[in-house]
C-alpha cells in the first residue's frame, strides 16, 4: 500500500489541474476499440438476404420485429418467441413507453395511473439514474430501497408492495447491477417472482441490460424470473428488457421486451398506433451477425478483453492507495457490467468537486439515488470503459488525491 500524505495529495491534484487534461467518465459508454468490433456486422450487410418466410425486412409489417431477432432474444431471456417484441436502438425507450402507457391508458384494463392519485415506484439504490429520471418526468414518487450484497432488501419490498396499492412498480438491474455490479441471488429472484402486490397493475421493471456482459469470460448465473413466476402463476408481473447497445453499437443496436402474452398484447395494442414496424433491416443485420447465444458469448469475450484491464487498473490503484480494510473507502470489483461503485464515507460531493477542477468528471455525485440525493453523501460511480489505460491512470491520480484531501478536511 502506498497511501499519500495530505501534502503529497495536494501536490498531485495541482499537477493534474495544471496538465490541462480532461477525462470524461460520466457515462458507461463503449470505447472506440469496442465499437470497432461491431464493424464486422456492417461489412457483411450488403450481402445479406433481407427476406424471410412471410416477410421482407425492407418493407412495412411485423410490428413485433423480425422472427430471427425475436428468436435470438427469446433464447437469451429463456422465454418463448411469443413472449418477445424486438424494437429499435434503446431499451430505455421501451421502459419509458411502458410507463407512459400505464399513465395514459392503464395496464391490462386497469385505470390509468394518472387517474389513481399519487403513484409510487420502489427504487433500489444506488441504482441507474435514468430509471429515476423517468419517474421524475412523470411525477411518480420514488421510494428508496437499500441495496444489499445479493439484491435489494426484499423484506422492505415485500412489505411495501403487499400493503400499498399506490406502489406500481420497481426498477431492477438484476445482473451486474448499475452501479454496484451485484448479481441477484436465486432467493432474491424467487422472492420477486412470488410477490403478491396490493395493486393489480404493479409491474417489476427487470432491466437486464448487462445480460451477457461478463468481464471474466465466465457465464455467471442469474435465475430466470419468468420460470420462477410461472410456478406461482405470476408471470404477468414482469417486464424484462435488454438491448445490444453494449454488444454492437450504443443507441444504434436493437432492443427487446419480454413479457407474458397478455402483457405483450397490451403493449402492442398501443404500439400499433405509434409505428408500422421497427427498423427491421437493422434487426436482420443483428440476427445474422450475432447468430446465437454461444456466438454472442464469444463477441462479449472480445469486449471483456478490452474492458478488464481498465477495471483491474482502477481496483489496483484504489487498493494501493487505501487497502481493502479502510472503513472510509470501499469499492466493488464486479464480475461484469460497466461500473465500479465507490463509497467514500460522507465526502462524495467534495471529491466530485475536487476531481472536476482537476479535469476528471464522474457521473454527477448523488445521481445514483432518487432525486439525486445520496443520504450518506458517499457513492461515486466509476465508468472506466471510455478512457484509455493511460487516461485512466491520470484520472485515478486525481481521484485518489481528491479522496485523500476530502477525508483530511
Ligand atoms: C441499467 C441500464 N439500463 C439501460 C441502459 C440503456 O440501455 P439502452 O441503450 O438499451 O437504452 C443502460 C445504459 O447504460 C443501463 O446501464
Image: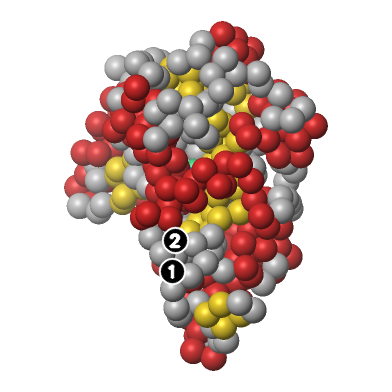
Relative to 92, say whether 40 is above or below. Answer: below
Secondary structure at numbered mark 2: loop
Query: Residue 227: which disc?
Result: none
Expressed as whole percent of the image width and height from the top left, the position of residue 199 reads 54, 19
Instruction: Indicate whether 281 appears above or below 252.
Output: below
Query: How many neighbours does mark 1 have within 10 angstroms: few (below 14), some (14-19), or many (20 or more)?
Result: many
Say whether residue 23 is visible.
yes
Say which label, 2 or 1, has the lower sequence index: 2
Instruction: Classify mark 1: helix, strand or loop.
Output: loop
What residue is rendered at 60% in x and 18% in y? 197
Relative to 296, say whether 407 is above or below.
above
Rendered location of residue 408, percent (x, y): 34, 18
Q: Do residues under tags 2 and 1 come within 8 Å of each other at their CB atoms?
A: yes
Identify the residue at image location x=26%, y=52%: 22
**Numbered circle sitting on residue 279:** 1
Residue 90 or residue 304, whichever sits in front? 90
User: Quarter holding the C terminus?
Assistant: top left
State which quarter of the image contains the N terminus: top right
The disc placed on residue 88 is: 2
Residue 355 in which image quadrant = top left
Amino acid at each position: 500500500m502506498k497511501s499519500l500524505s495530505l501534502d503529497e495529495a495536494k501536490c498531485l491534484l495541482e499537477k493534474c489541474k495544471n496538465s490541462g487534461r480532461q477525462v470524461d467518465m460520466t457515462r458507461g459508454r463503449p470505447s472506440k476499440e469496442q465499437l470497432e468490433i461491431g464493424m464486422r456486422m456492417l461489412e457483411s450487410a450488403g450481402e445479406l438476404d433481407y427476406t424471410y418466410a412471410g416477410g421482407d425486412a425492407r418493407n412495412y409489417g411485423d410490428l413485433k420485429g423480425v422472427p430471427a431477432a425475436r428468436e435470438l432474444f427469446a433464447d437469451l431471456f429463456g422465454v418463448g418467441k411469443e413472449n418477445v417484441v424486438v424494437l429499435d436502438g434503446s431499451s430505455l425507450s421501451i421502459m419509458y413507453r411502458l410507463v407512459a402507457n400505464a399513465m395514459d391508458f392503464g395496464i391490462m384494463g386497469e385505470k390509468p395511473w394518472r387517474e389513481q392519485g399519487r403513484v409510487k415506484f420502489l427504487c433500489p439504490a444506488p441504482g441507474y439514474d435514468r430509471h429515476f429520471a423517468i419517474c421524475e418526468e412523470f411525477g411518480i414518487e420514488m421510494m428508496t430501497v437499500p441495496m444489499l450484497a445479493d439484491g435489494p432488501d426484499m423484506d422492505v419490498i415485500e412489505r411495501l408492495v403487499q400493503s400499498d396499492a399506490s406502489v406500481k412498480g420497481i426498477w431492477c438491474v438484476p445482473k451486474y447491477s448499475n452501479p454496484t455490479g451485484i448479481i441477484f441471488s436465486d432467493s432474491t429472484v424467487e422472492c420477486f417472482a412470488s410477490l403478491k402486490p396490493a395493486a393489480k397493475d404493479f409491474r417489476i421493471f427487470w432491466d437486464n441490460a448487462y445480460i451477457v456482459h461478463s468481464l471474466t469470460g465466465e457465464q455467471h448465473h442469474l435465475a430466470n424470473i419468468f420460470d420462477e413466476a410461472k410456478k406461482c402463476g405470476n408471470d404477468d408481473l414482469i417486464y424484462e428488457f435488454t438491448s445490444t447497445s453494449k454488444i454492437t453499437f450504443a443507441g444504434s443496436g436493437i432492443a427487446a421486451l419480454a413479457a407474458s402474452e397478455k402483457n405483450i398484447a397490451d403493449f402492442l395494442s398501443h404500439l400499433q398506433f405509434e409505428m408500422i414496424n421497427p427498423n427491421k433491416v437493422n434487426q436482420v443485420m443483428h440476427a445474422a451477425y450475432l447468430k446465437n447465444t454461444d456466438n454472442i458469448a464469444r463477441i462479449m469475450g472480445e469486449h471483456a478483453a478490452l474492458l478488464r484491464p481498465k477495471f483491474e487498473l482502477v481496483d489496483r490503484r484504489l487498493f494501493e492507495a487505501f487497502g481493502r480494510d479502510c472503513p472510509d473507502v470501499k469499492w466493488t470489483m464486479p464480475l461484469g457490467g460497466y461500473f465500479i461503485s465507490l463509497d467514500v464515507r460522507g465526502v462524495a460531493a467534495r471529491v466530485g468537486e475536487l476531481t472536476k477542477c482537476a479535469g476528471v468528471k464522474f457521473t454527477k455525485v448523488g445521481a445514483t439515488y432518487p432525486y439525486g440525493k445520496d443520504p450518506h453523501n458517499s457513492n461515486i460511480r466509476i465508468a472506466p470503459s471510455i478512457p484509455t489505460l493511460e487516461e485512466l491512470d491520470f484520472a485515478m491520480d486525481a481521484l485518489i488525491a481528491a479522496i485523500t484531501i476530502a477525508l483530511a478536511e
